[in-house]
Structure formats: structure tokens, C-alpha cells
Amino acid sequence: MSLGDDEQTSALRAVAHPVRLQMLSLLTGAEMSAAEIARELDITQANASYHVRVLAKSGHLKEVGTEKVRGGVAKKYAYASEAEQVARRAGKRTTPDPEGWRLQIEAFSQELRRRIAARKPGGKGNITDAELWVTPDVWAQVTELVHEASALIHQKAKPPRTGDTIKVNMQTFLFEMYDGREGSR
């Protein structure tokens, strides 16, 4: 396994935990310390600190400054954009790690169940499930639109409970599949 494989596996496993997924969402629109994250997610500061270290080490979070707190100094963290994460791994060959992906999907599933339980009845939304055959042009257009929507929601995210905001969920999974004639599927 190459260094790139190890790094990608670490990155996938870093987000393969529901609390870390919540932290990434929280830190997309805000810069926070571990103590602030702990209060927002109602977990211990030690637990928040541990998960922040895992996410920072894997490149998902970046340190963005410090603040003085009761005679000490607290580090502030923010979500590292996709571009920043890509730049960090630039030049390193990576291949998907099936076990890392499996763990990440399990964490996404667990987190989605929690989010659905918090869904506001009557609120706007969309659920799509599709296993279809489309032309490469249509596939390219769909993936670009979803990428644009994902980039927009991340770029426009605000700190929790900012005035004139609503709490929302967005999870997308887009991927090409074996066609039944190739590979082992």
C-alpha cells in the first residue's frame, strides 16, 4: 500500500464517525474551539478535543487562530474546503479503500437516521433514490449540478443559530455502477 493509500484510508476513517460528521457540518459555517464544539454538540470537552484532533490530523479541519480563555489559549478550527484538502494531498496517488468507504457509509447512515428524526414536518426537501441508465452527457450534467449545489451550501453556511437561518441537511451519493457485464458485480 502506498503512502497515498494510507492517507486516503485515514481521511475516510476520520469521517467514519457520527460525531465527526456533526463537527464537520458545524465547522463549515463557523470557527470554533473544542470547548465551543462540545457545548454545541452536548458532549464532553475531552471527547470533542479527541475528535477535533482526528479530523485535523486527517486534513478535514484547519487551525484558524487562537483565543484567550481564562488564562489559557484555545485553538479555533474550521472546515478545510475540498480545494484545501485536495491541495494537501496533491501529487500523492490514491485509490479508494473499500473498508474505509464501508465505515464512512455506515457513519453517514447512522447520522442520516439522527437527522431524519430531527426533520421539521412540512419543511422543504427532496428525497431521490435512483438506479438508472443515462448517457454520459446527462451523467456529467447531473454530477456537475450536484457538485455546484454542494459547493454553494458549504460556501454559504453560517454559524449555528445565526439570525435569519434555518437548519438543513444535505447528503448526496452519486457514483457509477457495474453494468452487470463487467467486474464481479
Image (cartoon, helix red, strand yellow):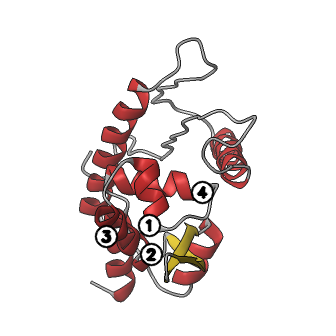
Disc 3 residue crowd, few under 14, some 14–19, many 20+, Cα 10 Å: few
Q: Which residue is mark 1?
A: 34
Tell me which numbered mark, 4 or 3, is placed earlier along the sequence: 4
Percent x, y for residue 172?
52, 41
Q: Pick whichever, 32 or 19, lies toward us.
A: 32
Rounded to the nearest angstrom, the CA distance separating label 1 from label 2 is 12 Å
On the rendered image, what quadrant is the C terminus found in?
Answer: top left
Pinpoint residue 100: horizontal percent, then vertical percent.
29, 62
| Residue 132 vertical placement versus 41 (above, below) | above
Q: Mark 2 = which residue?
A: 56
Identify residue for label 3. 50
In terms of secondary structure, where does tag 1 sit? helix
- Name the amino acid, label 4: Thr
Disc 4 to disc 2, how far (Cα)?
A: 14 Å
**Residue name at image x 33 percent, y 52 percent:** 43
Is residue 86 something one can see in this rendering?
A: no
Instruction: Say which element carries label 2.
Output: helix
Q: Give the mark, 1 or 2, whose residue is nearer the N terminus.
A: 1
How much space separates mark 4 and mark 1, taking CA atoms?
15 Å
The part of the image, by quadrant, that contains residue 79 is: bottom right
Q: Residue 34: name its quadrant.
A: bottom left
Left or right, residue 138 beside residue 72: right
Q: Residues within 10 Å of mark 1 (few under 14, many from 20)?
A: many
Mark 4 nearby-residue class (10 Å; few <14, some 14–19, many ≥20): many
Measured as percent of width and height from the top left, residue 2 is found at 32, 87
Residue type marked 3: Tyr
